[in-house]
Image: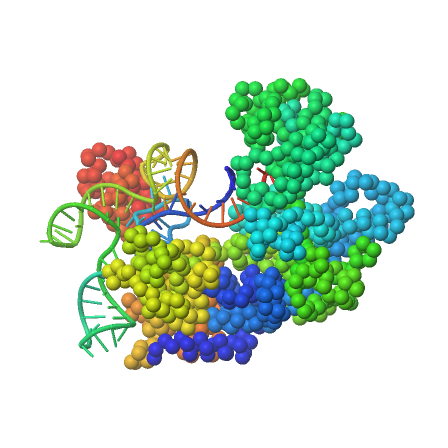
Amino acid sequence: MEYNFRDIEKKWQDIWEKTQSYLVENHVDRPPFYVLDMFPYPSGAGLHVGHPLGYIASDIFSRYKRLKGFHVLHPMGFDSFGLPAEQYAIETGQHPADTTAKNIETFKSQLRKIGFCFDWSREIRTSNPDYYKWTQWIFLQLFNSWYNPALNKAESIETLMHQLATVGLTGSNHYTNDFTAAEWNGFDYEKQQEILMHFRLAFSSVGVVNWCEALGTVLANDEVVNGVSERGGHPVIKKKMRQWYLRITDYAERLLEGLNRVDFSDSMKEMQRNWIGRSEGAELIFPILDSEHTINIFTTRPDTIFGVDFMVVAPESDLVEHITKAEQKEEVAKYVTYVKGRSDRDRIAETKQITGCFTGAYAVHPFTGKSVPVWISEYVLAGYGTGAIMAVPSGDQRDFNFANHFNIPITNIFGDAFDGTAACTSKEVTISNSEFLNGLTSKQASELVLQKLAEKKIGARKVNYKMHDAGFSRQRYWGEPFPIQWKDGTAKALAEDQLPLQLPILEKYGPGPKGEGPLANVSEWTAQDLETSTMPGYAGSSWYFLRYMDPKNESRFCDRKISDYWGPVNVYIGGTEHAVGHLLYSRMWTKALFDLGLIGFDEPFQKLINQGMIQGSSRFAYRIKNTNTFVSFGLKDQYQTDRIHVDVNMVDGFELNTDAFKTWKPDLENAAFVLEDGKYICGSETEKMSKSKYNTVNPDVLVDRYGADTFRMYEMFLGPIEQSKPWDTKGIEGVHRFIKKLWRLFFDEQKGKIWNEEEPTPAEWKVVHKTIKKIDSDSENFSFNTAVSAFMVCVNELTELNCHKRKAIEPILILLSPYAPHLTEELWQALGNVTSILDASYPICDEKYLLETEKEYPVSVNGKLRTNMVLSLEASQSEVEEKVLADDTIKKWLDGKPAKKIIFVKGKMINVVV
RNA sequence: ACUCGGGUGGUGGAACUGGUAGACACGCAGGACUUAAAAUCCUGUUCGCAGCAAUGCGAGUGACGGUUCGAUUCCGUUCCCGAGUACCA
């Protein structure tokens, strides 16, 4: 009987489907466990071998937890809104819903072949109206909520309205003009709504977008290259436009705090902390000379205030036009235009170039009364802090460079620590030349300055965040429509029974007349004054893990009892590319839903596993210039050549299959080759896996050739799950051999079944129990690559012991079932078991078989191992020492000198120190 | 520039809290079976030197230094690769 994986895998996949083996009920009397994959965007290219890496890991972990007695939720769905489908629609006229549905079918059929235990009855698609109905609904909860700083949580906007109507408003961060309750009650409806908009968690405001006049549309950062549009190379400028935002900054502190309660990698937490970018400092006011305007600045170094030599304001700031003196107007306007035309990427990339422009205005130093010039420069960003800084060249390197470049005199406040060649950024140096701060350290001086600022009422302590509120509008079609109607410039939420607000069918997908989303072209839409932008990709993905719990519910986004049962996701698996954006947004949504009492936990993901990216290993051929002749890698330097990507599937290792190459493309039919050693050798490089680089490997091909079980185990065998690595198909043979070897423990080609019911020997038990212990800890720790190795060792050892005993092999089979579900199920049944291996219980490892009765101890002298001196010891430590000292071979190594110390290492080794 | 990872044979990678570096697999070489191939099995495989051989000696985890009886593991300096992020005041 041979191992026929094609029949076996088809058979079990059909059975699983027919009996709905992976259907998960909601309330079961077993501890719940939720394992989630980051759901895929169903691109037209289908799956490549990189996609399933995380899914296989989560699948193994789910099955492992199931064997351990947990009730495991392991769903899958599709993040099906997105730009590529829309762009495809613009090009081909096909509706994104149709192409998306088609792509999903391809994905699902590919996934099915790999034998995952997804509960497909819970599948969700973010672009389905019965899903985005609830995305819209949650958006409205955010729209109708505000963050109450007194309670440190979100609550209904009604509570704010009540507060405003009874006590008015004072000292809010969100709305600077205070008013009394009487004033509030006197405001008209529009004015009240305008004020409320400053507090809503989902709010509308004016923001800056990349605007391309020639294309008449808004572009993403990705679509802007060197200040011009990627398509067509048209100029792109920044333009102000009404946008929707999420007030994620109100959650900054809690997003930071929550990181202490979750099991993410340190680097992941660090990334999120950096993104949030909390910094403590002071905000203070500099009046402008001969002007009623002031410059508000934020600084983390209030202690350096006597070192201020100039001020810098962001060129985008509204303040610029108010303070610029007549004689500088022209130059400033020129500079502002220059900055507007620069893409963010350019501004970021060029760190060496120093640009700026003097406004002609002077600010007044709050303590010395000295006049300091006010400049504008692109190194100050409008979006961070107050969009203006006090520049201290002796204490900040960028300020120092700026001062040097524009010949601005530098005040030294650090004495000898500042040598005039670089800024002194140390906080340990005591401050001098600073009036009342002289002789103080940075920390003391900062406190004192804060105190003085407060006394003079010109500044205060301030915590600032780098993160800003999340832009939530896209001028696109293929996204969730906002359930918002505009009436006289006031946004009004649609009633709940009007949801879902469905996307209308379009004739064409181009932008609206003024660069709005395509919905602006739909007359029924604009006739109702509906919002024409749509929500971004992360809207649907911010809460999808909740919908899986209760995917069919028509009256709630997720029943509270059900979300209480499952709780947060126990293990979340996905790549680092979504690390900051997606994770922060879904953490914020979760916290908001928690605050509003809609769910019972405030962190969505308890543990995060970041799978590494599988890179492609590209292959190249070298075409001699202006010919159709290709020269092998080793000889290419003798010619002038062009390098072209060759499909990796036509290459065996590095050797090109020249016949396949000739039939690859029509113009290669007559290709000639300059060979080395009779072979055409390709060049190689590790790159991102992509169709255009011809380095993708389709899992279908491998599953077809080796079977899903081999494919699953090989993906795991490749290396640690978190590590990025290039794909290499070569090693798959080894895993395939292992599986066939396992098969041969049960079946012989001639004799058929060869297992027996004999009692295993202690040696055999030891092999089995050693394996159980190893696999158990490896599976728990996501160390699947070493687990696969341990299986190989186990089968090799059992084969060597000629052990075909059912009692010994059955536990190994259960252990292996998460890794190779089809094969193990087949063998399990062949052994005569009536129930599925899915219902088997996890084998327990008995310590008594693990006890090692080691008698031989290697000896090292001065840390150097002496392999010819293995001592046989069964004695207490003191007896060991005597024995070691008495041993003649050791005396020889000690050169007759007495031993200073004898170290007995963990019962494993003896170290003699001379 | 900053932050976080990572550098181990021809290759992917093992090595628990410092204790015999190179598990497991690929590749390669040799052999068995076969008319032949496939499949399977066996042997060898870190490098250098010596030896007919078993084996012995020396070096060795990017480089240099430190702590230690002993370092792939801990500390310092430095080089390289990957990822992420940014004129963040």
Quadrant for the N terminus of chain A in the image: bottom left
Side (left or right) of A116 relative to A516: left
Residue A706 placement: quadrant: bottom left
Q: Is residue A103 above or below residue A636?
A: below
Q: Residue at x 54, y 79 (%)?
A: A18
**For residue A786, what is the image quadrant?**
bottom left
Q: Residue at point 71% right, 27% down?
A: A362
Q: Nearer the viewer, residue A654 or A165?
A: A654
Q: Position of residue A790 (x, y in %)?
A: 38, 61
Q: Position of residue A146 (x, y in %)?
A: 75, 50
Tell which of A884 and A310 is nearer to you. Answer: A310
For the question of whether residue A826 can be seen, the reply is yes
Q: Is any atom of residue A779 visible in this view?
A: no
Residue drawn at 35 percent across, 64 percent down: A651
Nearest the camera: A896 or A66? A66
Q: Position of residue A876 (x, y in %)?
A: 32, 46
Between A572 and A689, the one lying in front of the other is A689
In the displayed structure image, the side of residue A868 where residue A242 appears, left or right: right
Can you say whether A551 is above or below A861 in the image? Answer: below
Q: How many marks?
A: 0
- Taking the image as shown, residue A150 lies to the left or right of residue A225, namely right
Colour scheme in the image? Answer: rainbow
Spot occupied by residue A713 in the image (x, y as percentages of width and height): 42, 65
Q: Classify B64 as above or below A537.
A: above
